[in-house]
Amino acid sequence: MSNSSSIRQFLLLAFADRQELQLLHFWLFLGIYLAALLGNGLIITTIACDHHLHTPMYFFLLNLSLLDLGSISTTLPKAMANSLWDNTDISYMGCAAQLFFFLFFIQAEFSLLTSMSYDRYVAICKPLHYGSLLGSRACVHMAAAAWGSGFLTALLHTANTFSLPLCQGNALDQFFCEIPQILKLSCSHSYLRELGLIVVSACLAFGCFVFIVVSYVEIFRSVLRIPSEQGRHKAFSTCLPHLAVVSLFVSTGMFAHLKPPSISSPSLDLVVSILYSVVPPAVNPLIYSLRNQELKGAAWRLMTQFFSQIRKCSIFHAYN
């Protein structure tokens, strides 16, 4: 038996027992991580450099890409390092930091997705009031509220979770530090405080989910009233990527935490946790770029200019 004061490190769940499979997981996650860095980095750079994309929709998309980069960078590099070196250790402070930043980015992302649904609602249902309702100051305030809610939620949960006495060992049945796995190590009824915070957070998340659903009900009603097929297609093209991202984010998170205990197993929990913590940040750039011709055109122009500059520099150095 041990308590939290004597715990200096936690043991994370390994992806496989054999070193060959661990290396396979390393290369797989390295590919996913590089794809997430490239996709989100390209979106951030394109929006920041192209003044035509300095609109509320792309401002929120830039913030979403920043949050995606943060969330996947919180969990995947440590998992890759553990797979590469055949190690499962994470320090006590490292676990606390990982939990804080993961909660911070996940909560902020869900709040931002709620703001993005409001942006689409105003753009389609109240287009004449779009400039007044979503000016630059309003957008900054909404983004700041999303980041602030993530910080406050993460701070409360992390401080409360790591104030609990732990006496059930130090092995976590997860590849990163997560609240439910740490609560399993608690040896007192103090964990009820954390459960109370989780219930409050779940209620707030449910409120955001209801807001998103109501917004899209109104959006689809307005889109179906548009007389021209081209107008309906344009409206859908701006909404469907966001709806796909919300659906992926919510469905994987709900299945991970609300699945029946009867079908729960360490291997299934590991796969599901990857689905909601790793897959969305890597896939979101692809979802947004598939149907957004404006974003694809801006990204293509940016890459063309970049390679053109490289070519000019190489020709200059060749002649000198």
Image (tube, helix red, strand yellow):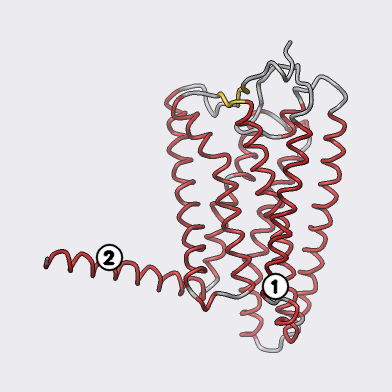
Indicate which disc residue 206 carries: none
Tell me which amino acid carries mark 2. Answer: Ile
Mark 2 vs mark 1: in front: 1
Residue placed most toward the observer, 48 or 275: 48
The percent position of residue 274, horizontal first and vertical second, equals 60, 41
Q: Are marks 2 and 1 in contact (CB under 8 Å)?
A: no
Residue 236 picture quarter? bottom right
The percent position of residue 283, horizontal first and vertical second, equals 55, 54
Residue 74 sits above or below residue 219 on the image? above
**Mark 2 vs 1, N-terminal side:** 1
Residue 197 picture quarter? top right
Element assignment for label 1: helix
| Residue found 72% across the figure and 79% down from its top | 124
Residue 244 sits above or below residue 218 on the image? above
| Residue found 35% across the figure and 72% down from its top | 305
Judging by the rendered image, the residue that carries numbered circle 2 is: 310
Residue placed most toward the observer, 199 or 50: 50
Disc 2: CA contacts within 10 A as few (<14), some (14-19) or many (>=20) = few
